[in-house]
Amino acid sequence: MNLNRRSFLISGASTGLLLGLSPLLTPLARAAQAGATEKYEVMHTDAEWRSLLSPSAYNVLRQEGTELPYSSALNSEHRAGIFACVACSQQLYSSKTKFDSHTGWPSFWQPLDNAVKTRDDNTLGMTRTEVHCKRCGGHLGHVFDDGPKPTGLRYCMNGAAMKFLPGAA
């Protein structure tokens, strides 16, 4: 294949356009993939979620967005306590399971019992495991199998989806 400057620029622009549009297309793809609407203990209309959540929390929790790496203050949170869903206060992770994954997002090697649910996420041309709040269904992040012992898992969470509750973990 003969790659000249014009072909290279066009290819780069096309890739950039697709990557730029992916945050807009992801919710549509996920809605089609999910099928029927799931029922949760805490449910609101889209308008209600918009009024209850900050723009960044709404983007992550309800539109399955991703915050920029290293943008969350929760990366630097090292006190004893619980990380909870910002939308419904479901307790999600103990600070005892938090670790620095050097990825830019708060990471944990294990959620609290019955705190989260997972499902396959086949968007963006890859298969990942999405993590969402069991109580309200809000998107939290993804789980990967490159974490530390004892589980070997890395729950890579968006800080915008969580709040920190200091105290016993």
Image (spheres, helix red, strand yellow):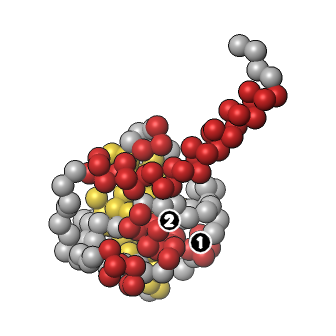
Q: Quadrant of the N terminus?
A: top right
Q: Residue furthest right?
A: 5
- The percent position of residue 150, horizontal first and vertical second, equals 42, 51
Res. 91 visible in picture? no
Distance Cα–Cα, label 1 vs label 2: 8 Å
- The percent position of residue 128, horizontal first and vertical second, equals 41, 44
Drawn side of residue 49 relative to residue 96, left or right: left
Three-letter amino acid code at the position of disc 2: Asn
Three-letter amino acid code at the position of disc 1: Ser
Q: Residue at x 42, y 60 (%)?
A: 64
Q: Which mark is residue 128?
A: none
Drawn side of residue 123 relative to residue 6, left or right: left
Location of mark 1 (residue): 72
Drawn side of residue 11 relative to residue 118, left or right: right
For the residues labelled 1 and 2, say whether their Cβ atoms are less than 8 Å apart.
Answer: yes
Whichever of labels 1 and 2 marks the residue nearer the N terminus, that label is 1
Q: Which mark is residue 158?
A: 2
- The percent position of residue 124, horizontal first and vertical second, equals 48, 43
Q: Quarter of the image holding residue 12?
A: top right
Q: Residue at x 23, y 75 (%)?
A: 43
> For the residue carrying disc 2, how many other residues have a C-alpha within 10 Å: few (<14), some (14-19), or many (20+)?
many
Indicate whether 22 appears above or below 69: above
Looking at the rendered structure, the secondary structure element under dot 1 is loop
Q: Residue at x 38, y 67 (%)?
A: 62
> For the residue carrying disc 1, how many other residues have a C-alpha within 10 Å: few (<14), some (14-19), or many (20+)?
some
Closest to the observer: 30 or 163?
Answer: 30
- The percent position of residue 51, horizontal first and vertical second, equals 39, 84
